[in-house]
Amino acid sequence: MKEPKNVSFGSETLPARYGLLTTDQTGKVVATNERLALWLGLDAFQMIDARFVEMLTIASRIVFETSIVPLLSLHGHVDGVSLDLTDAEGNKLPVLLSAEETGAGERKVTSFVFLLADARRAYERDLSDARTKAEDQLTTSLHEAQLREQFIAILGHDLRNPLASIRSAMNILSREPLSQRSQDIVELTNGSVRRMSLLIQNVLDFARNRLGSGIHLTVTTGTDLEAELEQVVAELRSAQADREIQLETSDLDTVRCDVSKVGQLLSNLLGNAVTYGDPSQPIQVRAVRPGADSFELSVKNYGSAIPETAMAKLFDPFVRSTSQEDQQGLGLGLHIASEIAKAHGGSLRVRSDDSFTCFTLLIPQGVSN
């Protein structure tokens, strides 16, 4: 008899590492597998017609006759009972037995499945080791989460506060009589401070989003929205004096949004337009209410199209619009812009061809955000 690769037992298919045996209504063996025969040091054919109880130790026979047989008659199955088989040399073989009884009268058969007790103990040891490993990994993950929170705190406090001091110092200097060279240095420094502040804010939002807290919004009626957009454009004009940035706004007083986050989104889109757009062509910013139920903000620049290979992952983190290695930044700007749009229940779309590229933010209005 060849050992089967898989053996059906009830509704399950069991791998052949289990010992298998079937008896008829009289308790005689009618089928077995070579795995069980190997454990017992017997020939599988020689086991046919032997009485199953004779393969048990005396103590296990008593347990089988007084407990297992009545349970099989009552419930039709038993699971995971510890018994001792006797091998060809009279040695005990501790096993775990499961059994199922089917049919009635002369057609009644009982199917037995055996698992070496040592294998079960090894399984339990492996399970315990896996549980311990999982607990250790959880402890490590919690520790790493605490470190990430500390990292966010460092970004939010230890970096932003010094930048605010630098910005204040530059503002004070800008009101003093300065030479043209000094004025250029102040403008250059202000541009660097702005880029660093935006980079820190993007990293903060990215970290919080990945930690599960999402991008927090403070939604208000946008009475300050137009002023925020004008400030963002003015800062970029100051930092990029050689670039023309056009701004068109209309009917923004009733827009419901997080004003500072929309300003951050615009800053990210403008930074992308400055980096990849044609420097000889203007960048066009348009913020309008196309209808009572929506707000639209678009940033359009002229130049080459975004490559198809980049388009599919354009809003993924750490992805840039082109493969140029000399571009600055972490590649978080468009990702954070997209996440800000989603947090508002809106969307950020892009259209790009050989003549222009346009990013459009759409935020629904008339509902709570």
Image: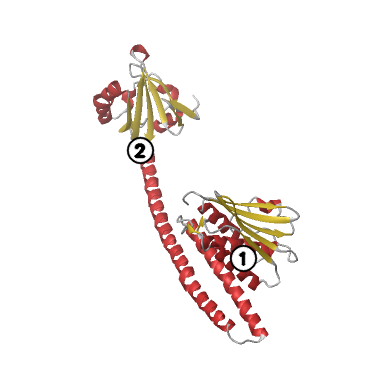
Q: Measured along the vertical axis of the image, is residue 126 above or below residue 287?
A: above
The percent position of residue 47, horizontal first and vertical second, equals 40, 23
Q: Nearer the viewer, residue 57 or 127?
A: 127
Element on which disc 1 rests = loop
Which badge, 1 or 2, is on the more N-terminal residue? 2
Q: Position of residue 263 (x, y in %)?
A: 56, 63
- In the image, is residue 124 above or below residue 52? below
The reply to whether dot 1 and dot 2 touch (C-beta < 8 Å) is no
Label 2 sits on a secondary structure element that is helix
Place of residue 176 in the rendered image (x, y in percent of width and height, measured from the top left): 58, 86
| 312 shown above or below 17 | below
**Which amino acid does the dot numbered 1 rest on?**
Gly
Q: Tell me residue 96's x, y (percent).
A: 34, 34
Residue behind mark 1: 329
| Quarter location, residue 307 | bottom right
Query: Going 63% across and 69% down the picture, which residue do you hit?
Result: 236
Q: Which residue is mark 2?
A: 117
Left or right: 305, with 99 as reference point: right
Q: Which label number is shown at residue 318?
A: none
> Residue 187: in sight, yes or no?
yes
What residue is drawn where x is 44% and y is 61%?
144
